[in-house]
Amino acid sequence: MMSRAMNKLLLEGKTGVIFGVANKRSIAWAIAQSLANEGMRLAFTYQGDRLKESVEALAGGLKGSLILPCDVTSDEEINAVFAAVDKEFGKLEAVVHSVAFAPREDLETDFINTSRAGFKTAHDISAYSLVAISKAALPLMEKAGGGSILALTYLGASRAVEGYNVMGVAKASLEASVRYLAANLGPKNVRVNAISAGPVNTLAARGIKGFTGMLHHHAEKAPMRRNVELEEIANAGLFLVSPMGSGITGEVMFVDCGYNIVGL
Ligand code: NAP
């Protein structure tokens, strides 16, 4: 309250890296805007030249931002991101991991038919990448005296959600990784948390069979009788990343208008 009165932004002088902006509807972009609005300087990664332009167009509007290529299946590319961030920022307070992928055929089939290759890919991109990114970010966060890492997950990690299939199993692995990383990195003052978001109409979500039906169902059954807004996920992200969330680590926080508490 006092700092607001003095017009000091919550994240002034702090820096962050955002993985997972594909376009203006991406959850990563909503969170990035909320962090930038509070003064955080950001680096953005994009996967492949296909997304370069769209990430440049969005991030280019934010003062002092960096834009770097990164396919999270490559340790070399992950290390190159943090080397560039070290050179430019010299330290790091935040990482947002908003990346997920599973091959369409593995998402669409009955779970029992998941292929070995599809299972591996889903886990590599959607869960292991958090471990690899955290490891590469750690020396920079230690330079800052601590930091905060945030991942995005979904209820399909703990419940069998029709159509979510292998992605649910990968999200269970992601959530367990959040807890183990939090336990490892807590003594270094690095916090690791996840937001479990209700369904939002994004590029990745459209890969889920029956996604529109899922949106309607959530809005009908959620205690708040509506779907979550991108801005609400972004606000929760700001809370967890910023000093406002300083006592919280290893947590999976639902931002889903209460859908997860409902039985029938
Ligand atoms: P999105 O805009 O499509 O973002 C997903 C991002 O992951 C894209 O930028 C995508 O890039 C990137 N990605 C995929 N494979 C990658 C790789 N190998 N290397 C680097 N980046 C890669 O969709 P979103 O809904 O905002 O998803 C963000 C996160 O929120 C995901 O973890 C998702 O599971 C989670 N989430 C989403 C919802 C929802 O309903 N939308 C709900 C709960 C949780 P490409 O486009 O190039 O693949």
Image: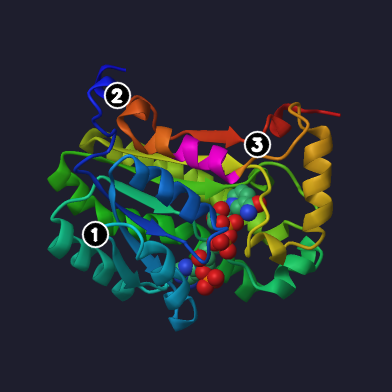
Which residue in the protein does label 2 denote?
4
Magenta part, dominant SS: helix
Q: Work out whether residue 76 or residue 37 is closer to the camera in this orientation and state it.
A: 37
Disc 1 and disc 2 in contact, CB within 8 angstroms: no
Q: Across the whole image, how many numbered discs are drawn on residues?
A: 3
CA distance separating discs 1 and 3: 33 Å
Give the crowd class for mark 1: few <14, some 14-19, many >=20 residues within 10 Å: few
Instruction: Tell me where residue 178 sits by quadrant.
Output: top left
The residue sitting at the bottom extreme is: 49
Which residue in the protein does label 1 denote?
64
Residues rendered magenta in the picture? 230-237
- Quadrant for the N terminus in the image: top left
Does the magenta segment cover residue 62? no
188 to 143, vertically: above or below = above
Mark with earlier residue (1, 3): 1
Asked whether, in this view, residue 80 is left or right of residue 181, the answer is: left
Amino acid type assigned to the residue bearing label 3 in the image: Asp
Which residue in the protein does label 3 denote?
256
Residue at the image position 49 percent from the left and 35 percent from the top: 236
